[in-house]
Image (cartoon, rainbow, N blue to C red):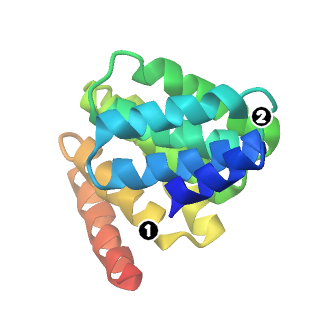
Amino acid sequence: HAERAGQIYSAQRDLRAAARARALAGRALRMSGSYTEAHEQLNEALTVLRESPDHNTVQALNELLAIAVFGGSEDAATVSAETMELAQAVGAAPALHASILVNAGVGQLFRSQVVHAAALLREGARLAEHAGDTYVQARAMTNLAAAISGFEVAAACDAGWRAIELSRQCS
């Protein structure tokens, strides 16, 4: 549907709306595991969205961040920094900030930067809880449990149990 919406907006010469639709298509592709296609869609969308940044730009960057993190990209740290800076600049909602922090935290965890990862994940969990986003909070707690399991065993167990409780609320 997003692809068709993009075609309609393009035909009407509404480039920003077409870019938002392209970003949604990129998100759907990322979630289905088509990272290369998603990356292309998101970069094309961001070419337009970056001209006048807003929350849509931040959402698209967060999707690109997720691809960079889970794809093991060398530019994950750069995308993470840009996404966090822009989120703050445009006053993104707490739930979006939480998702960005969790993605960035997972990126740090993949790089074995466990203290940095734990800090990002804890703050992501706190913001997600504040925003009422149990899905993002559960992601944060799951990854926090993994991050701290080697040196804070009791806290890791608590985080893991909390993640399970939150996950049950999501279904």
Residue at 42% across, 30% down? 116
- Residue 97 in the image: x percent, y percent? 62, 48
Location of residue 126 by image quarter = bottom right
Q: What amino acid type is highlighted by mark number 2?
A: Pro
User: Which residue in the structure is indicated by mark 2?
Assistant: 53
Residue at 77% across, 49% down? 12
Query: Please, what secondary structure does the residue beneath circle 1 have?
Result: helix
In the rendered structure, the answer to whether residue 14 lies left or right of residue 139 reads: right
Q: What amino acid type is highlighted by mark number 1?
A: Tyr
In the rendered structure, the answer to whether residue 137 lies left or right of residue 59 reads: left
Residue at 43% across, 42% down? 103
Q: Nearer the viewer, residue 31 or 25?
A: 25
Q: Nearer the viewer, residue 155 or 30?
A: 30
Residue at 35% across, 71% down? 162
Q: Nearer the viewer, residue 11 or 9?
A: 11
- As drawn, the label of residue 3 is none
